[in-house]
Amino acid sequence: MSEKVLMKGNEAIAEAAIMAGCRHYFGYPITPQTEIAAYMAKRMPKIDGVFLQAESEIAAINMVIGVAATGKRVMTSSSSPGISLKSEGLSYLAGCDLPALVVNVQRGGPGLGGIQPSQSDYWQATKASGHGDFRRIVLAPASVQEMVSLTFKGFDLADKYRMTSMLLADGTIGQMMEPVSLDMGEVTQYDKSWALTGTGRQRKPNIVNSLFLKPEELEQTNFERYDRYAQIEKNEVMYEEYMMDDAEYCVVAFGIASRVSKNVINEARKKGIKVGLIRPITLWPFPKDALLKAADKCKAFVSVELSMGQMIDDIELSIRCKKPVLLCNRVGGMIPTPQDVMNAVEEAVKIGG
Amino acid sequence: MSFSKQVLIAGFGGQGVLFTGKFIAYNGLFEEREVSWLPSYGPEARGGTSNCSVIVSDDPIGSPIVMNPDILIAMNLPSLDKFEDAVVPGGKIFIDSSLIERKVERDDVDVYYIPATQIASDEKLSGSANMILLGNVLKNTDLMPYENVSKVMEKLVPAKRKNLIEINEKAIELGYNF
């Protein structure tokens, strides 16, 4: 089935999840991601799946924990304020080593904020999604096609490493339509002998639990988890380089910001500015090595974000502050205009020399 | 010269702004071009001013946000006020002159005044002003060929709502021949 169809980003996530074998969806409506729930409500009953609109985001994430413990593919979706409500459950998912996919179609914050697109949950997604020592795989789609491929990938990585993946989108990518191919190939099956599926009195009961009262034991679970995280940092980094071969200046942007940036890079090249783009696709693990490598040949960096400057910290860390990093940002539901980004690139040229 | 058109459709929620955009986007899909369709969403889509960015191009599309349209379809005065200056020099503006009384002030763009809401009402096609305007766009631009109308309509409107297909096709024809 390679024929392309026009789909909204949110609907593409839902269809991709179903294709990836997800038959359990728990959610609670919130703009700008409600189409995911609406799509699931329509499709799930027809394929013997479960769509359940929970009484709250907190209930939904706890239902996710329940299904995840049985080893079945499960997801929930929300937008920024709703994700905050889920953070306790996200920490429990990590503590129990449970695979699940959580979608955040971000809107402006903090608080109830607004409903227009934003990337201001970057810190929350990559660093502070709940209490305790844990990481989460964070995937940042920049097109409707990537809503499909990264949803697929998110489920796969979650199963592979027994942990939660997050698809971190924004209102623009969620609401827009683009042609997509839904041909994602086979779903890889992973060993789930840990799952709670009933013993049939044939084996010892499995236990899924995040409570370890003995500090030695709890320390050990953390160490083991971080060994897995190290594998992910080594093997699963994804990013796109655009016109980086001869680049003297490097724009770093993900999601909708990367698309605006690409337009600007094309224009800047016409003016003779050698600028390229590194687009992180995994926000955790962050493409540190690619950036550090770029720091050897680029004179300055520009971080284009729909936040007050969150990813910029990771860029500076990755390049070990070897080169100046400028921030080009809009917030509150605003999107940097091509002119905003061009101004920042020209400023980088001035500073970088 | 590779094909690339940026279209902005703007009006009140309920005027079919998003549907008009979808129509153009689906044609782009049929022609195997790169396409993006981006609606305004939230309170705007529920009765306030609504707009829709559509890009159809032979090349990969960067930003889906149309800042400077080649084609502007303005279906109410606030939309014309807001976007008139954004149209590229040499661009085309299509206006529902039943709802917008003023003229375009710029002289570096082509303007088409179509009393679409009036025509729709006279022809008992109420709610189809958007398709009448689109018909006129087809005549005066190379956005999409008229022959594709039936094919796109078939894809976009479910067969069981055959009457809607007929109404929309009639409206496009009226706009095309205006």
Image (cartoon, rainbow, N blue to C red):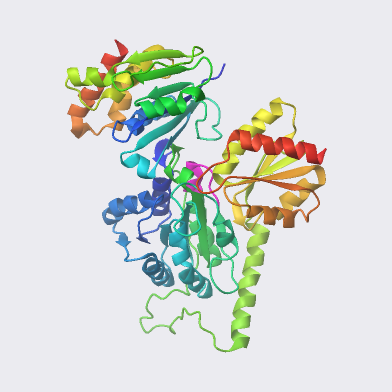
Residue A320 is left or right of residue B103, and the answer is right
The quarter of the picture where the C terminus of chain B appears is top left
Q: In the image, residue B166 lies at what x, y percent?
A: 21, 23
User: Which residue appears at 39% of the width and 46% of the height?
Assistant: A11
Residue A79 is left or right of residue A44, and the answer is right
Q: In the image, residue B27 lies at what x, y percent?
A: 39, 25
User: Which residue appears at 44% of the width and 66% of the height?
Assistant: A85
Instruction: Look at the image and say whether residue A146 sits in the magenta stretch.
Output: yes
Q: Which residue lies furthest to the bottom in this view?
A: A214
Q: In the image, residue B103 lies at what x, y percent?
A: 39, 15
> Eyeballing the image, is A207 above or below B161?
below
The quarter of the picture where the N terminus of chain B appears is top right
State the residue in front, B20 or A140.
B20
> Eyeballing the image, is B23 above or below A156?
above
Q: Could you tell me if residue B32 is visible in this image?
A: no
> Eyeballing the image, is B119 above or below B29?
above
State the residue in front, B88 or A155.
B88
Residue B123 is left or right of residue B41, and the answer is left
Give the magenta-colored segment's residue range: A140-149
Occupied quadrant, residue B120: top left
Instruction: Look at the image and say whether residue A144 sits in the magenta stretch.
Output: yes
